Image: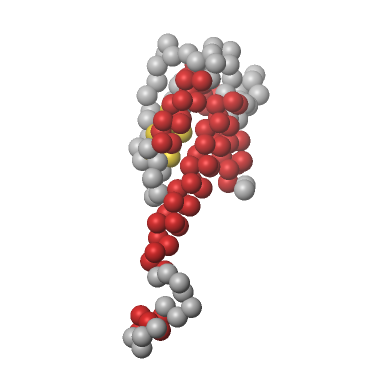
Amino acid sequence: MDGSVEGKLMAGWSKKPTAFVGTVRADVEAFAVSKADQAARDVIYKAPMDTSRFLSNMNFSVNEPNESFDENSRDVTRSLTLANARSAMAAFKSGDIFYITNVTPYGKYLEFGTEKMDARPTFRDAFNKISGD
């Protein structure tokens, strides 16, 4: 190595530390996408299927929440909802925020229950699962 400050800092390194930025960014992105995928699958497969309206109104987006709702939407096989999640994940980049939203009017009653109905937590369970790793 030369006698410069950079040469002294680089002693023992085969590459400059800045050369790892792309690798670290890719690793962080892959980790975040794997967590998003796990959370998406958890809410999709835990959502009740009686009418599939709640399930089919799961919205997956990057950097801005999608709060749309379609009263007539149905997905009895879960495949369309899963495809929507994967499509959003494909747009994800390091530093982005992955949103899973559902504004179905009765969704809060499914999540938290009522006096006559037990809670069926979908979002809380998914969140707890990915944050507990």
Residue furthest bottom as drawn: 3
Residue 94 pos. (x, y %): 40, 49
Residue 37 visible to an observer of this rendering: yes
Number of numbered callouts drawn: 0
**Position of 77 compared to 93: left or right?**
right
Q: Tell me the colour scheme of the image.
A: secondary structure
Q: Nearer the viewer, residue 95 or 11?
A: 11
Residue 70 in which image quadrant: top left
**Position of 85 compared to 4: left or right?**
right
Residue 64 pos. (x, y %): 35, 37
**Position of 17 compared to 48: left or right?**
left
**Position of 27 compared to 63: left or right?**
right
Residue 44 pos. (x, y %): 55, 26
Q: Split into 4 quadrants, where in the image is the N terminus? A: bottom left
Query: Does 72 appear above or below 64?
Result: above
Residue at the (42%, 54%) spot, across then down: 25
Query: Does 16 appear above or below 109?
Result: below
Query: Does 108 appear above or below 127?
Result: above
Residue at the (56%, 37%) spot, across then down: 38
Query: Does 122 appear above or below 8?
Result: above
Q: Nearer the viewer, residue 132 or 28?
A: 28
Q: Which of 56 and 26 is in front in this view?
A: 26
Residue 104 visible to an observer of this rendering: no
Residue 114 pos. (x, y %): 60, 23
Residue at the (48%, 52%) spot, across then down: 27
Residue at the (56%, 40%) spot, across then down: 127
